């Protein structure tokens, strides 16, 4: 265990969750964070799918990293990601049809997620499979928790529900409470991500720029 | 080995795409049957949903056979072309709507709920981002709506995608597609709070205006194809 979780691997895993978060610090994958977070459920499933795919792609690229011709490395990475996404989506269609219907276009969107290409190029190309796997899981979770937080607030304030269960009591509506329609609009996802960045930077002195 | 040589790069690329192509072809081939089965089962669930049947924890296949003993194919003149249940089920309404009017084959599912006949018609159209489709169940009078089902490929979650919610679909129950003069008027979808004096209407979705308009156009186009079929029995049941 100690070998599996050395100080370096721990850093590789924990870094993306906070100080090196792919969404709030590196500002990658914003497009999908904006598109799928109007409801909590797609946010969860999208986060989960990205965790699985980043980890698997990282391992595959890391395994073949020494054989990849330098000039076509981006294309090789793309092919690996696209193949994985297609296989995952085929499996979902066969064994979890309802989930695949719900995800519809989102699953294909994973291919265009900058976090994947970023991790493959920056980490998996120069690290061993195990570290790459941990890095993929770490970055996937780092991406997923931002999505879940944003999805949570957008669904709660925009629809008054969570996972489609009504949580804001009927009595509130009778007293004149109205769902905030702006929450359903894409810009609100950016504003919520910005609020998370604000809180994160206020708490972490390391992330603040020198004046 | 020198991984920067041109020949190496080319051979590598060829091997890579071949391996990936074989893998994808294998996965797709191996899962094909299972996927088709899922798609058909899902279609049956959608049709049952138009009858407001609660599917939670139920065997959709058995329920489908129980509620829908027969399905027929009609043309745009309302004439029955075929009484083959399987053939009617396999019709892709979106493709039929693309054909010339005289060649269109339209499926009608003849359902029985609590002893009363219901007619389920198939509909297809376009929303904001992609295709939308649905099923509309009519009562015995072939005029008032018994239940509806709509779904979409990729409408905006929380806005246009609300057409897939029962809360929207149930607004259509009891609305009529013919006016008092027995003319086909379809059902209007208006902005919440507005009205349509010429025909029956339901409230659209706030923030999902284009998708709502898409549903309205879909009803008008697709159910409009069945106009002759719908009027047929009104005559039989009314004046005869």
Image: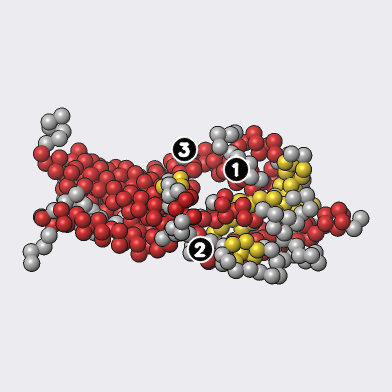
The residue indicated by pointer 1 is: B45
Identify the image quadrant of the C terminus of chain A. bottom left
Badge 1, how many Cα within 10 Å: few under 14, some, many 20+? some
What secondary structure is found at the residue carrying circle 3?
helix
What secondary structure is found at the residue carrying circle 1?
helix
Q: Nearer the viewer, residue B35 or B42?
A: B42
How far apart marks 2 and 1 lie (CA) works out to 27 Å
Left or right of A48, for residue B238: right
Badge 3, how many Cα within 10 Å: few under 14, some, many 20+? some
Q: Nearer the viewer, residue B48 or A205?
A: A205
The answer to the question of whether label 3 and label 1 lie on touching residues, with beta carbons closer than 8 A, is no
Quarter of the rendering containing residue B70: top right
What secondary structure is found at the residue carrying circle 2?
loop
Q: Is residue B6 visible?
A: no
The residue indicated by pointer 3 is: A95
Residue B167 on image: x %, y %: 56, 52
Sequence-first disc among 2 and 1:
1
């Amino acid at each position: 265990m100690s070998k599996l979780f050395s100080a370096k691997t721990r850093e590789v895993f924990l870094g993306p969750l906070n100080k090196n978060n792919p969404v709030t610090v590196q500002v990658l994958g914003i497009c999908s964070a904006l598109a799928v977070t109007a409801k909590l459920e797609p946010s969860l499933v999208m986060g989960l799918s990205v965790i699985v795919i980043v980890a698997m792609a990282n391992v595959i690229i890391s395994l073949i990293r020494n054989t990849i011709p330098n000039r076509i490395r981006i294309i090789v990475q793309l092919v690996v990601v696209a193949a994985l996404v297609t296989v995952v989506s085929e499996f979902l269609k066969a064994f979890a049809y309802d989930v695949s219907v719900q995800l519809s276009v989102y699953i294909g969107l994973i291919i265009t997620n900058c976090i994947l290409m970023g991790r493959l190029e920056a980490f998996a190309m120069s690290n061993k499979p195990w570290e790459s796997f941990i890095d993929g899981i770490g970055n996937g979770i780092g991406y997923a928790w931002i999505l879940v937080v944003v999805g949570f607030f957008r669904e709660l304030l925009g629809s008054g529900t969570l996972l489609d269960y009504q949580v804001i009591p009927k009595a509130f509506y009778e007293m004149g409470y109205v769902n905030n329609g702006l929450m359903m609009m894409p810009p609100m996802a950016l504003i919520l991500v910005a609020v998370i960045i604000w809180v994160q930077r206020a708490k972490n002195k390391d992330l603040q720029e020198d004046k | 080995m020198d991984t920067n040589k041109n020949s190496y790069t080319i051979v590598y690329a060829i091997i890579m795409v071949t391996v990936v192509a074989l893998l994808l072809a294998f996965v797709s081939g191996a899962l094909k049957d299972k996927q088709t089965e899922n798609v058909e089962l899902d279609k049956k669930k959608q049709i049952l949903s138009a009858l407001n049947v609660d599917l939670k924890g139920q065997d959709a296949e058995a329920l489908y056979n129980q509620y829908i003993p027969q399905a027929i194919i009609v043309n745009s003149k309302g004439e029955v072309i075929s009484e083959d249940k399987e053939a009617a089920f396999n019709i892709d309404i979106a493709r039929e709507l693309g054909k010339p009017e005289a060649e269109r084959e339209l499926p009608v599912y003849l359902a029985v709920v609590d002893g009363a006949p219901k007619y389920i018609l198939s509909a297809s159209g376009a929303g904001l981002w992609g295709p939308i489709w649905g099923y509309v169940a009519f009562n015995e009078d072939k005029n008032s709506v018994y239940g509806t089902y709509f779904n979409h490929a990729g409408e905006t979650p929380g806005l246009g995608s609300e057409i897939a919610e029962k809360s929207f679909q149930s607004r259509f129950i009891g609305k009529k597609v013919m006016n008092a003069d027995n003319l086909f008027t379809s059902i209007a979808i208006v902005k919440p709070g507005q009205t349509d004096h010429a025909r029956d209407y339901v409230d659209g979705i706030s923030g999902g205006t284009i998708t709502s308009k898409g549903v309205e156009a879909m009803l008008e186009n697709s159910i409009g194809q069945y106009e002759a079929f719908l009027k047929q029995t009104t005559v039989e049941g009314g004046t005869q």
